[in-house]
C-alpha cells in the first residue's frame, strides 16, 4: 500500500530476511539488504533517492531496525540462529527465561530441567500467560505455563511480549508467539546430535556433607539429544512441506532413590541399591503450505509429542516398587486461511486443537496384585504399589479469527484497525482407574514403641471419570492511530465471557468400597459465568529517528479454566480415612477389620466436593498494569531499553492455590469448632522424651465431639 506522501506499507509479511530496493528514472537507486524482520515487529526503513543524470545504486547491508516505533508492548524475538547458538536445554520451557523480566524457579544447566514445567513470573508477579504455537493457544486452564512439551528445534522464531499487551491478549502474563519452520522451493534440512557424560557435571558438596556419606545429589548418567528436519517443495510456487523428528533422553540419579531394600530387607538403610530415574521427550512435526491463489494461502500444521518417565514420583521415600509409569502424549493441530480481500483488507482465520493426556499407571511398571499401597507415618516411607492410577485428559478446540483494515482516508491522522474473535471450548477429565491390589493406602505407625504397627486405611472411590467444561468467547477491537508522523496511539477494547459448568454425569460406584462411595447420577451444574470488557491503551513517541518513549495502561482478565469446576464435582475423585484394626496381624486389610460407617467409631475424615459452596456473585479478578519505557538504537543491530512496570492485583479468586491444588475451607466445621487443646512435649533432636535435650511444649487443637461424623466434612 502507498499514499500521496510517498510512504509504502508492506503488511502481514512472514518473519525472515528481506532485500528492499527503491528506484525511479532519473534518480539513484537505493538498496537495503539483510533486513531481518522478526515476528510482530514493525520496522520503518527510510530510503533517500538522490537526483542524478547518471543512475547508480547505493546498497546498505546488515542494518536492520532494532527499535519498534509503533508497537507499545515490551517484546523480544528469538530467531532460529539465536536459539541454535545459545547453550541451554532444547525445551520450549527454557526459552521463556531468556526474555527480560521473565523468571522461573529453577535455572536450567545443560538440559537439567528437561521436561520440567515451571510457573512463569513476569516482572515478579506469577501471572497466566498466553502461549501460542502456530496460532494455537497451548496454555490450558488457569495454569501459569503449559503441559504441552516441545523441542524447539522445529521453530523458526519465537516472540515473547512481557508487558503492555494489546486487546488481542486476555491475561496479564507473557504473550508468546512461536512459528514453526516452513518449506520453500529449495530443499533444506538440519540434522544435529549432542550428548553429555558424567564427566561434565560438578557438585557443590562440602566436606561436612561428604562426611555424612553424601557423595552425589542428582548424578547424571546419560543424556542425548537428536533431531532432524527437511523442508521443500511438492509443487513449485504452489505447495510446500516441512517435517521434523526429535528425541531427548536423560538418565540420572535421585538422592536416596532405592531399587530394593537391600540385603537386610529394610528401606532407608545404607545397603539399599540405588535406581536410575529416566526422562524422555519425543516429537513429530508436519507443516504444509498451499498457495490457493495470489491473495490466498492455506496452512496446515500438526505436532505430536510424548513425555515419558517410567519411574515417576521417585525419591528417597518412594522406592522403585512404588513409582508409576508416566506417559504424557500431547498434540497441536491447526488449519489457517490467510487472505487479502483487497489491498486494504486482510483476513486471517485459524482453527484447531491443542491438548494432552497425563497417564500415570503403576500397572505398566511395578504394581502387583499381592502388594497394596502402604505408607509408614513415622518415616513417610511409601512401599507396595503406587496408590493412584491417574488418566487425565485435557482438550481445547479453538479458533482465532481477525480482520485488519487500513483506511484510505485519514481522520485526525492515519489508522490501522483490527477486530477479531477468540473461542475456546475446553474439556477436562481428571479420571482415576483401579489399583491392581486395592484402591486404598494402608497406614502404619510407631505406636507404644512398636514400629510398623497398622493404624489407618485411606479408601478411594475409584474408578471415576469426571467431566469438567469451560467455554470462553471473546471479541476485541483495536486501533493503531498516528495523529502525527512521530506519534502512535494504540487503543483497544476486549469483551470476554467465560462459562464454567459441570455437564450431567454419573458415577458407577467404587469398586472396593461401594458402601462408602455408592453409585449416583448428577445433573448439570452452572458453576460460574464471568462477563466484562477491559480497556487497553498505549503511546509511542519517536524522538530523532533512533529513540522512542512508550507508555501503556490496561486491565487484564483471569481465565477460570477447565479445571475450575472440579472443586464442585461430586463425580470427582474422593477418599475417606478410617481406623484400621489388623485383627489377624497379617498387615493386610481383611473385611471386618474396619467399620466403614461414615458415622461410626472408625471414621476419621473424608474429602469430596459435596460441601463446597458456589458463589454466584463472584467477580473476575483484576490485574492493572502500567508501564513506561525509553528505547534507543545504539548501533547496528544493538539497542537498549529502560523500563518501569507496575502491576496491581486485586480480587483474586481463592478456589485454587498457585500450585493448582484446591483450597479446603470446610464451612460445615468452622475454625471455632477446633476448641479442644492437646498438649505435647517436643522430644528434641534425638526424638526421645525424658532426657536433657527435650524442648518446650506444643499445643494442638482438635474439634469437639459435636462436630464429628461425615455430616461435617
Image (cartoon, rainbow, N blue to C red):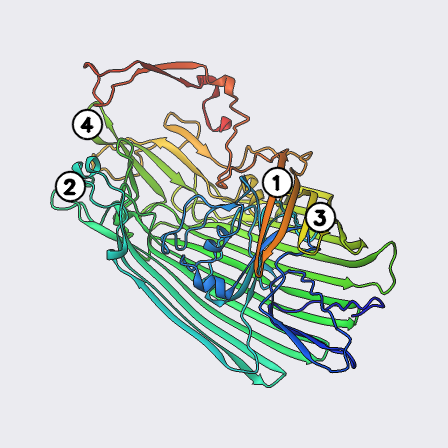
Q: Secondary structure at mark 4?
A: strand
Q: Secondary structure at mark 2?
A: loop
- Sequence order check: which comes first, mark 3 or mark 2? 2
Q: Marks 4/3: CA distance?
A: 61 Å
Q: Secondary structure at mark 3?
A: strand
- Sequence order check: which comes first, mark 3 or mark 1? 3
Q: Closest to the observer: 122 or 472?
A: 122
Q: Marks 1/2: CA distance?
A: 54 Å
Please give the residue where the numbered disc 4 appears in the rendered image: 450
Q: Residue 711: x percent and y percent?
A: 50, 27
Q: What number is the disc on residue 270?
A: 2
Is residue 65 something one can see in this rendering? Answer: yes
User: Which residue is rendered at x = 55% and y = 77% of the image?
Assistant: 183
Image position of 122 with respect to 292: above or below: above
Q: Secondary structure at mark 1?
A: strand
Image position of 387 with respect to 308: above or below: above
Amino acid at each position: 500500500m502507498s499514499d500521496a506522501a510517498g510512504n509504502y506499507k508492506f503488511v502481514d509479511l512472514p518473519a525472515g530476511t528481506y532485500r528492499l530496493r527503491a528506484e525511479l528514472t532519473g534518480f539513484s537507486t537505493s538498496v537495503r539488504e539483510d533486513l531481518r524482520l522478526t515476528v510482530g515487529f514493525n520496522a520503518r526503513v527510510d530510503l533517500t533517492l538522490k537526483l542524478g543524470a547518471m543512475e547508480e545504486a547505493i546498497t546498505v547491508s546488515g542494518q536492520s531496525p532494532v527499535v519498534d516505533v509503533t508497537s507499545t508492548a515490551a517484546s523480544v524475538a528469538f530467531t532460529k540462529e539465536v536459539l541454535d547458538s545459545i547453550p541451554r536445554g532444547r525445551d520450549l520451557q527454557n526459552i521463556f527465561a531468556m526474555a527480560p523480566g521473565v523468571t522461573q524457579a529453577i535455572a536450567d544447566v545443560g538440559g537439567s530441567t528437561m521436561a520440567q514445567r515451571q510457573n512463569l513470573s513476569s516482572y515478579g508477579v506469577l501471572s497466566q500467560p498466553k502461549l501460542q504455537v502456530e496460532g494455537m493457544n497451548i496454555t490450558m486452564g488457569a495454569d501459569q505455563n503449559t503441559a504441552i512439551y516441545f523441542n524447539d528445534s522445529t521453530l523458526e522464531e519465537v516472540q515473547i511480549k512481557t508487558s503492555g499487551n494489546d486487546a488481542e491478549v486476555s491475561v496479564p502474563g507473557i504473550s508468546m508467539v512461536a512459528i514453526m519452520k516452513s518449506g520453500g522451493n529449495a530443499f533444506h534440512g538440519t540434522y544435529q546430535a549432542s550428548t553429555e557424560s558424567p564427566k561434565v557435571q560438578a557438585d557443590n558438596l562440602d566436606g561436612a556433607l561428604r562426611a555424612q556419606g553424601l557423595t552425589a545429589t542428582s548424578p547424571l548418567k546419560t543424556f542425548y539429544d537428536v533431531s532432524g528436519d527437511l523442508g521443500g517443495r511438492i509443487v513449485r510456487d504452489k505447495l510446500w512441506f516441512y517435517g521434523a523428528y526429535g528425541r531427548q533422553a536423560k538418565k540420572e540419579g535421585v538422592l536416596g532413590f532405592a531399587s530394593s531394600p537391600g540385603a537386610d530387607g529394610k528401606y532407608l538403610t545404607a545397603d539399599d541399591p540405588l535406581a536410575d530415574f529416566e526422562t524422555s521427550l519425543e516429537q513429530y512435526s508436519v507443516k504444509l503450505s498451499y498457495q490457493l491463489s495470489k491473495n490466498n494461502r492455506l496452512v496446515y500444521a500438526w505436532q505430536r509429542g510424548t513425555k515419558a518417565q517410567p519411574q515417576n514420583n521417585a525419591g528417597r521415600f518412594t522406592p522403585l516398587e512404588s513409582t508409576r509409569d508416566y506417559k504424557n502424549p500431547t498434540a497441536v493441530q491447526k488449519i489457517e486461511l490467510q487472505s487479502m480481500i483487497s489491498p486494504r483488507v486482510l483476513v486471517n482465520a485459524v482453527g484447531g486443537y491443542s491438548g494432552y493426556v497425563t497417564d500415570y499407571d503403576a500397572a505398566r511398571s511395578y504394581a502387583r496384585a499381592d502388594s497394596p499401597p502402604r505408607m509408614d507415618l513415622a518415616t513417610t516411607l511409601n512401599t507396595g504399589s503406587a496408590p493412584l492410577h491417574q488418566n487425565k485428559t485435557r482438550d481445547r478446540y479453538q479458533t482465532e479469527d481477525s480482520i485488519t483494515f487500513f483506511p484510505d482516508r485519514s481522520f485526525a491522522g492515519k489508522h490501522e484497525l483490527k477486530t477479531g474473535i477468540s473461542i475456546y471450548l475446553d474439556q477436562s477429565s481428571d479420571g482415576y482407574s483401579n489399583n491392581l491390589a486395592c484402591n486404598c493406602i494402608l497406614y502404619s505407625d510407631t505406636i507404644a514403641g512398636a514400629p510398623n504397627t497398622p493404624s489407618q486405611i485411606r479408601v478411594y472411590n475409584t474408578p471415576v471419570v469426571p467431566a469438567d467444561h469451560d467455554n470462553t468467547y471473546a471479541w476485541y477491537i483495536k486501533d493503531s492511530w498516528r495523529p502525527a508522523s512521530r506519534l502512535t496511539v494504540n487503543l483497544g477494547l476486549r469483551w470476554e465471557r467465560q462459562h464454567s459448568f459441570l455437564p450431567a454425569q454419573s458415577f458407577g460406584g467404587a469398586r472396593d468400597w461401594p458402601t462408602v462411595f455408592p453409585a449416583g447420577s448428577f445433573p448439570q451444574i452452572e458453576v460460574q459465568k464471568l462477563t466484562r470488557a477491559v480497556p487497553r491503551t498505549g503511546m509511542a513517541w519517536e524522538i530523532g529517528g533512533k529513540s522512542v518513549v512508550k507508555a501503556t495502561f490496561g486491565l487484564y482478565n483471569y481465565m477460570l479454566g477447565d479445571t475450575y469446576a472440579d472443586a464442585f464435582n461430586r463425580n470427582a475423585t474422593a477418599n475417606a480415612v478410617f481406623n484400621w484394626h489388623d485383627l489377624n496381624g497379617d498387615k493386610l486389610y481383611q473385611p471386618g477389620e474396619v467399620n466403614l460407617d461414615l458415622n461410626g467409631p472408625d471414621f476419621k475424615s473424608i474429602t469430596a466436593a459435596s460441601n463446597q459452596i458456589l458463589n454466584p456473585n463472584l467477580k473476575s479478578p483484576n490485574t492493572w498494569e502500567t508501564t513506561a519505557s525509553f528505547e534507543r538504537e545504539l548501533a547496528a543491530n544493538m539497542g537498549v531499553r529502560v523500563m518501569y512496570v507496575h502491576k496491581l492485583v486485586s480480587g483474586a479468586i481463592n478456589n485454587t492455590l498457585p500450585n493448582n491444588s484446591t483450597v479446603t475451607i470446610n464451612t460445615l466445621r468452622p475454625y471455632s469448632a477446633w476448641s479442644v487443646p492437646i498438649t505435647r512435649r517436643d522430644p528434641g533432636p534425638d526424638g526421645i522424651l525424658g532426657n536433657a535435650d527435650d524442648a518446650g511444649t506444643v499445643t494442638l487443637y482438635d474439634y469437639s465431639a459435636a462436630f464429628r461424623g461425615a455430616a461435617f466434612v
